[in-house]
Image: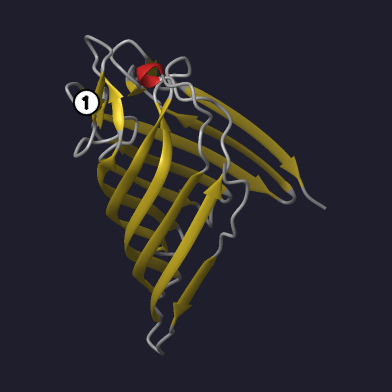
Amino acid sequence: MEKGRFSGRAGLGYEFENGIVPYVSVASTFNPLIGYNSVGGVNEPFKPETGIQYEAGIKWSPTAFPAIFTASVFDLTKKNVVSGPFNAQNQIGEVRSRGFELEAQANLTENWKLLAAFTAYDLEIQKGVGADPVTGAPVSLKGEQPFLVPEVIGSAFLDYTFTAGQLKGLSLGGGVRYIGKSEATQPNTVKVPDATLVDAAVRYQWDNYKVSLNVTNLFDKRFVSGCQGINVCSFGEGRRALVRASYTW
């Protein structure tokens, strides 16, 4: 069994005077795993998971207002990926993930702040064997999509801060998160539905004091976050409120 390997990353970028920065990067990974394959009666120790990712993109920091915008494409290939519920795990030979990402962080004005992100995936199992959901017999997973990973993820959050008047120091924010459909089974026969969630935040800061309330899944929407087979699914987190208070000196 392979016990060790070097991993690393490298990147190159160039900044133009107008704030645009094109870049490229490459990264490799090596992750030793604990466990045994259980599909088809095979009881062999897991091999280390390895991967390599190529990425290219553009970052832009405009001069008109403080912000950074990023657009990138990526190609990630992983080998020996562990798949399945804890009592029936096996290693998929090779999984390829391609996609693109968009991200924005901008102070639109003195009061308004925007945070937004969007990711789209194209995932495919290149090599691998799984279990038939009915008979349990080994079947080829080539060309199938891994479960748990949504095809699309997106979010947008807008924040407003009062900078004058009696409400000075108060910030109000709200946003939405979108979790796209994902596969529930391998081979792919059932999908997990998509879900749209709403978040909100209130903050107040005066002198050296700061108090905040953050609420995720504001309307307590009931949804399934992911499945590893039709009988192994997890519900997403319901409404959660977090209060924080701090003092700095």
Q: Is residue 205 left or right of residue 143?
A: right
Residue in the image at 27% along x and 23% along y = 184
Query: Foreground: 141 or 55?
Result: 141
> Within 10 Å of the Cα at label 1, are there few (<14), some (14-19), or many (20+) other Cα atoms?
many
Q: Is residue 28 above or below residue 213?
A: below
Q: Is residue 9 above or below residue 221?
A: below
| Secondary structure of residue under mark 1 | loop
Instruction: Please state the horizontal and vertical placement of residue 137, each as a whole percent of the image.
Output: 26, 15
* Closer to us: 140 or 31: 140
Q: Amino acid at mark 1?
A: Pro
The single residue placed furthest to the right in the displayed view is 249
- Check disc 1 and report the residue beneath it: 187
Which corner quadrant holds the N terminus?
A: top right
Colour setup of the view: secondary structure
Q: Residue at x 27, y 54 (%)?
A: 99
Please indicate, yes or no, whether residue 64 appears anywhere in the rendered image: no
Tell me where residue 49 appears, x and y as whole percent: 49, 43
Q: Residue at image x 41%, y 34%?
A: 199
| Quadrant hosting residue 193 | top left
Counting from the top left corner in percent of width and height, residue 128 is at 30, 35
